[in-house]
Amino acid sequence: MSNIRNFSIIAHIDHGKSTLADRILEMTGVIHSKNNEQVLDSMELEKERGITIKATTIRIPFKASDGREYIFNLIDTPGHVDFNYEVSRSLYACEAALLLVDVSQGVEAQTVANAYLAVDANLEIIPVLNKIDLPHAMVDDTKMQIEDMLGILTDNALKVSAKDGTGVPELLEALPDLIPPPSTNTDKPLKALIFDSHYDTYRGTICHIRIFDGSLKQGDKIQVKSTGKQYEVEEVGYFGIRMEKSNNLEAGEVGYLCAVIRDVKDIHVGDTIISADHPNTDAIPGFKKMKPMVFCGIYPINTNDYDKLLKSINKLELNDSSITFEKESSAALGHGFRIGFLGMLHMEIFLERIRREFDQELIATMPSVAYKVIRTDGEELNIENPSKFPTVQEIDHIKEPIVRTKIIVPSDYVGSCMELANSKRGKLVDMEYPDDRRTTLIYDLPLAEMIIDFYDKLKTVSRGYASLDYDFKGFEKGDLVKVDILVNSDQVDALSYISERESAVTKARKLVHRLLKLIPRQQFKIPLQGAINGKIIAREDISPVRKDVLAKCYGGDVTRKKKLLEKQKKGKKRMKMIGSVEVPQEAFLSLLQVQGDDNKKK
Amino acid sequence: MITRKSKGLYVHIPFCKKKCSYCDFFSVTNFDGRIENYIEALLAEADLYRNTSIDTLYIGGGTPSLLGKSVSRLIDGLKEVFEFELSEATIEVNPESATEEFLSATKDSGINRISIGVQSLSNLELQSVDRLHNRSHALDTIRLAREIGFGRISVDVMIGLPHQTKESLLETLETLTNLDVGQISAYCLSIEEGTPLSRHIPSSLPSTDKQVELFFILRDFLIKKGFQHVEISNFSKPGEEPIHNLNCWRGYDYIGLGAGASSFVDGVRFKNKCNLDDYIHSPTTQKIVEEELTEKEKAFDTAMLSLRMLLEGLDFNQLKEHLEIGVISEIKEILNNLVTKEMLIESDGIYRIKDDMVLKSNKIFQEFII
């Protein structure tokens, strides 16, 4: 029997996943001190935000108290609903999952979602109760929730405090028995799952793989199942703290593979690697190419920086093959890119990373979803940018993406959560009562409403208690219109948005009013207008600057007055010239606030 | 750029009986018995610059008229330390404290120009910003200064005071010009951070648009009366221009003495700390360097400040002397650009702000911030 044990830790956000991983690494001697906090979250941003964006894998040698030696492969998973598919693939690479639940919080929406992913991947699920040292630990309640909501027996549930290490040695001792060993069919032709990849400047795309059948060594000819592309293996190895070269990888093992794969887009998570000598080997089930759900435009403030921006995107794309991007040009903003993301968090993280990488001012436009526009001639268009919508006369109807949303919330907040979901055009599908203090609300929500600020709002109305998970359901017909915004009589394509017809006018008025406050007065009067199909539905005027002068400037104030001018000038640098109007970056995201206000009032 | 033998001298008198609600200059109201000590401290600081040649003197505040007859001790002391070759010696006075004794003493010490903080001749407007004087104090002070023999009288007027109207402004100006003042400094009331005014903005405060309207009414009126718009906030009859201030906008050096006073010497801007007790205790150790300008920064500052002088303008040919070619072309490019945008007018190498840009000139000045 193999001495390998492959497992993941799955948990709701903040339930202590990275902390438990750190304790495991310490107690097995992989890392030696507590200075190496959260080794698995290696990206700077991950540490700042406390969530795992990129999954990391690590090989852990473990000597049990009975003297037997094991190899644990801990395959970390991204911790957010945007990355569900990646999670499912990482789980598929394992035989078991530690279902980590914070006993001061209980089972949350992502606990449920992740547990289902693990069940789908046929994994052995091992409940682990975390934070048992806390005074308000609800061990029995949590156990009951796990049994009732997930149907997982908790007789053997392990109890730990990842923070102080209590229970972790016992957990390590128990793992070899609780996790089934992998099957080790080395005689069959090669079959390996790509569960992640990253880019190395010298070696190209490096695949993170789990071998199910056969084995792999330097010089082997391999083929990527979905593309048919063939490569020669240059190196294989394991994931220690760093990558460690090995002679070969065998069935049951987890490791990496380099084969001079130049283009990161040739490797997709979930794809199967087979032997080029056995091209008919079956693919591992569950592979799909991820489709981006949320789109936004990004533009340099200074048009000269276009090439630099492209370089920055290319660089980030190498380690995030789930984004899509294409060149886009906007009459208002010039040349830029339309980037597709898996979800809002994915977008936020990418934008933050690109701001750091690019190190120049850039404009991100309002996020949008992809709509299906059915023309009067029956043609169906897939439109990711509101400004690209056909004219009203050409449109027969519009379909928008809907997500099925699961909200788990304490019963006290059900009313306010339902109010919120209703205000976001949600349709209640079902209500469930997982235990006597909580309710599960199932809603169908337009993704367009979800991406704005639904999660933040949900947290607010439930005082942080509600948890959320969602899945793409499909496209449904909606009563939608495109609203255009005109600044100084010029239509600014980057400000166009799609709205349900009923609230279009109110929204346009609020947006125009918001822009009035954001766009500084200039030398001339600037009309701001909202329009549907050329018909003006909202208007405000920005009156011209009449006074902008340092009236008093004598010997005593020169330095101070210069500082004031410097501040003014800096503000100006962050603006985009649209025609002859200086527009601040915030203006392009002002619709977010308009919709946010909307909810506060309700 | 010009190198001059003489420097300007500014002396700060940081005493006020009461702070005006809009003022953010450094001054203290609790100064009982410290005037003499302060004067001695000023003279001790002056000693750092012994024998420096001075061509303009400006004693400002605060409220210099609170010095009373001690002003003679101050001026006599300065004369002893510096080489005075004064073309202009100004002192600021407030109407409520400008006694005959004080004015005579300043005259006798060689002060030849007085700057009176009139602000307005409407009692309602004066009260609304906590001024201590009224209309008759102001008029009496002007007449008294004339009687004592001051040839050059300058007055400050504020635009945009609470309750101010076009009529009340014109009445103030009419009366002042009839008294034959030679220079009027007209300041738009601005709300500075940390002032009492910024905490309680009166509802009677005219709007920005109203302020702009009042400013142009004032300008048109004064120009009709023979004044020239010499600087954004300054109107002078020919021969009455404020030389000390003009020199500062020309980028010339000046020495500042006193708590909170700023200096600009050899491209360094430095300032004394704003603490009266510390200054009296140790007047020569209060300096903080604010900026050390490179030749380029100095040229940019000079260009920006010179443009404030609407009449004299920026003489590019003079500015470019001794400047590196790169800096010259950078400044030239900015200037040409501003001409193209119709913000500046150029004639014979002299650049001036266009009339309609006077109250929007930050757009121009920003270009000279590096």
Image: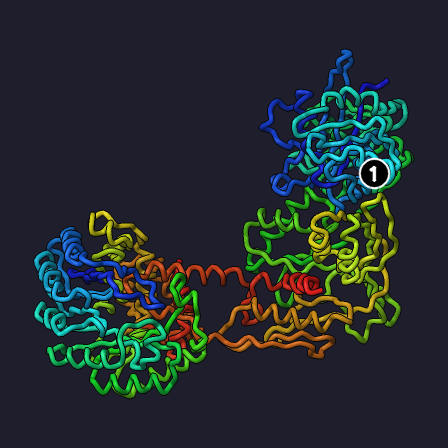
Q: Nearer the viewer, residue A87 or A235?
A: A87
Position of the C terminus of chain B, as image quadrant, is bottom left
- Against A352, residue A189 (above or below) is above
On the rendered image, what quadrant is the N terminus of chain B found in? bottom left
Looking at the rendered structure, the number of numbered marks drawn on it comes to: 1
Question: Residue A267 sits in which quadrant?
Answer: top right
Q: Position of residue B66 (x, y in %)?
A: 19, 66
Q: Residues within 10 Å of mark 1 (few under 14, many from 20)?
A: some
Is A275 left or right of B268, judged from the image as shown? Answer: right
Name the side, left or right, on which A209 lies relative to B91: right
- Above or below, A406 against A37 in this view is below
Q: Position of residue A533 (x, y in %)?
A: 74, 76
Can residue A506 be seen here? The reply is: yes
The picture places residue B273, in percent across and down from the top left corner, at: 28, 52
Q: Is residue B268 visible?
A: no
Residue farthest toward the top in the current orientation of the protein: A67
The residue to which callout 1 is attached is A145
For the point 47% across and 74% down, the residue is A545
Task: Name the foreground residue: B314 vs B252.
Answer: B252
Q: Residue A547, how many percent across, how many down?
A: 43, 74
Name the residue type under label 1.
Answer: Gln
Seen in the picture, residue A170 relative to B81 is either above or below; the reply is above
